[in-house]
């Protein structure tokens, strides 16, 4: 089950997004059991970052991964403010940046990290691969 708690922020179809996320997981050998995406403001995400990770900085996304083996169970928190800012800075549409962050959370659940420069590069390449999958006709 995939759910989006977005307060009407999302402009993309939830059903199409869910099908896309399931396809990404399947291609990587995973099954999605429960995946919640929560779209929040920057202040809420900052509070969560401090409370749960002891990080004193802004971020665009936090992923809490409860997965076991290849069964995905997770919740992601996405800053609408940071998403819009990232889209502007990177000359991307809101929709494209949304896809990037949705896939980013899922990639973390597959065990991918983004701490080192090499990991960040790999993660970006995987995000781009996922985004291109969304635009392929089914």
Image (cartoon, grey):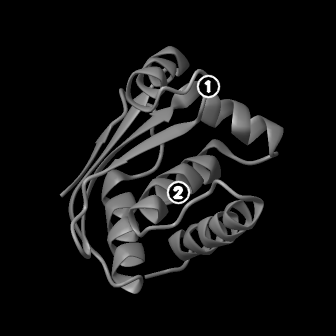
Q: CA distance from mark 2 to mark 1?
A: 17 Å
Q: Nearer the viewer, residue 54 or 80?
A: 54
**What is the quadrant of the N terminus in the image?**
bottom left
Earlier residue among tags 2 and 1: 1
* Element on which disc 2 rests: helix
The quadrant in which the C terminus is found is bottom left
Q: Is residue 35 left or right of residue 49?
A: left
Left of 3 or right of it: where is 115?
A: right
Mark 2 or 1, closer to the camera: 1
- At 45% from the left and 54% from the top, the residue drawn is 105
Label 2: few (<14), some (14–19) or many (≥20) C-alpha neighbours in 10 Å: many
**Which residue is labeled 1 in the image?**
58
The label shown at residue 35 is none
**x then y, percent, for residue 86:** 71, 38
Q: Residue at x 69, y 60 (%)?
A: 120
Kindly check if marks 2 and 1 are in contact, taking CB atoms under 8 A apart as contact: no
Q: Seen from this angle, which residue lies furthest front?
A: 54
Work out whether residue 116 or residue 7 is closer to the camera in this orientation and state it.
116
Identify the residue position indicated by label 2 in the image: 104
> On screen, 19 above or below 23?
above
Q: Classify mark 1: residues with Cα within 10 Å, few (<14), some (14-19) or many (20+).
A: some
Q: Is residue 47 above or below residue 91?
A: above
- Disc 1 is placed on an element classified as loop
Position of 3 relative to 16 (above/below): above
Q: Residue at x 46, y 60 (%)?
A: 108
Classify residue 110 by image quadrant.
bottom left
The image position of residue 56, as x and y in percent, is 58, 21
Please provide percent x and percent y for residue 96: 63, 53
Of 74 and 133, nearer the camera is 74
């Amino acid at each position: 089950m995939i759910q989006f708690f977005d307060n009407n922020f999302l402009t993309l179809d939830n059903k199409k997004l869910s099908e896309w996320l399931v396809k990404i997981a399947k291609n990587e050998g995973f099954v999605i059991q429960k995946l919640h995406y929560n779209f929040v403001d920057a202040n809420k995400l900052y509070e969560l970052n401090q409370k749960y990770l002891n990080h004193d900085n802004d971020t665009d996304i936090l992923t809490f991964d409860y997965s076991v083996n290849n069964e995905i169970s997770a919740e992601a928190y996405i800053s609408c403010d940071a998403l819009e800012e990232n889209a502007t800075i990177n000359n991307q549409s809101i929709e494209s940046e949304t896809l990037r962050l949705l896939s980013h959370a899922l990639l973390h659940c597959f065990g991918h990290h983004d701490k080192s420069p090499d990991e960040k590069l790999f993660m970006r390449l995987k995000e781009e691969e996922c985004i291109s999958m969304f635009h392929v006709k089914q």
